[in-house]
Image (cartoon, rainbow, N blue to C red):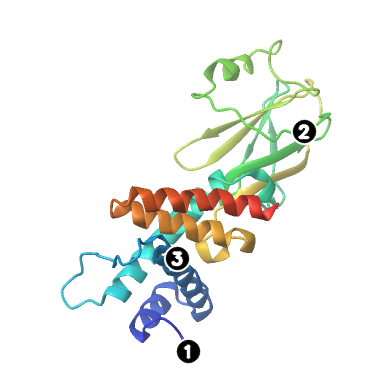
Amino acid sequence: MSIFSPNLIALLGEIYGSTTIAAARYNLIGMVRVKIDDLLPEGEGIEYALPSGASLKDTLDIYIDGLLNESAKHLLQTAPRDVLRPVAAVAPIATNTGDGSGFIEAPADFLRFFALMIGGWQKEVTKTIHPERDKAEYLLQKNIWTRGGKVKPVVAINQTPTKVILEYYSLDTGDTHSITYLRYIPFAEAELVQDNLQDALTWLCAGRIRQAVKDEAGANIAFQNVEMSYANIY
């Protein structure tokens, strides 16, 4: 028997257009509810402002549902690299700028850089620099004498209003530009986040809900449990 009311099941089924997707989200919502209950001081009830005629259970479940994807995005952006499962970009294209450097347009679902290996490089790059955050290092890449090369390559991530561009530095002028592999973390709906991160995801969502009701102590416990969840994966 489902622990969710028929009204909520019908609502989420309509929202996501798939009973399979909706069922997966039901499970996550249930996990978040259990964690919220664990965070409540003994004897304390859950107090949320309810719309007229709404049930507490459905209102809270819908609120959790609304935070799941945001929590999933944050989790995938911040989780330790060792617990993530990157995907390989399919047929990425390296564009030669003519001076030995080049760029790659990231896939549409790109969320987080993981690794890039260009043919001719002696090692992969696993960290990026940003034009604004790492301005001094980024400016060095614009000079052929100070930029990264085959031994110590550099990748800069540059975002336009419509796409993410990965600039790579560099090869020798005249070299052929080919991508050995580009690995990245794609954005994923909460129910599609890798299974070993579901515990961390639901703790993060529970913490954000407790934070929203000004329970900083409960939120901090939840966020600490996110970190503990990572440790348990190793």
Q: Position of residue 152 (x, y in %)?
A: 76, 23
Residue 199 to residue 140: above or below: below
Query: In the depicted view, which residue is nearer to us: 101 or 3?
Result: 3
Please tell me how many numbered marks the rendered image carries.
Answer: 3
Q: Residue 32 carries which label?
A: 3
Task: Say whether disc 1 or disc 2 marks the residue closer to the N-terminus.
Answer: 1
**Residue visible at 32% across and 75% down in the picture:** 57
Residue type at numbered disc 3: Val
Left or right, residue 164 beside residue 148:
left
**Residue visible at 34% across and 65% down in the picture:** 63
**Residue visible at 18% across and 78% down in the picture:** 53
Could you say whether the residue bearing mark 2 is in a helix, strand or loop? loop
Query: Which residue does the numbered mark 1 point to in the structure image?
Result: 1
Residue type at numbered disc 1: Met
Query: Which residue does the numbered mark 2 point to in the structure image?
Result: 177
Q: Residues within 10 Å of mark 2 (few under 14, many from 20)?
A: many
Q: In which quarter of the image is residue 156?
A: top right
Between the residue at mark 3 and the residue at mark 2, the CA separation in whole angstroms equals 47 Å
Could you say whether the residue bearing mark 3 is in a helix, strand or loop? helix
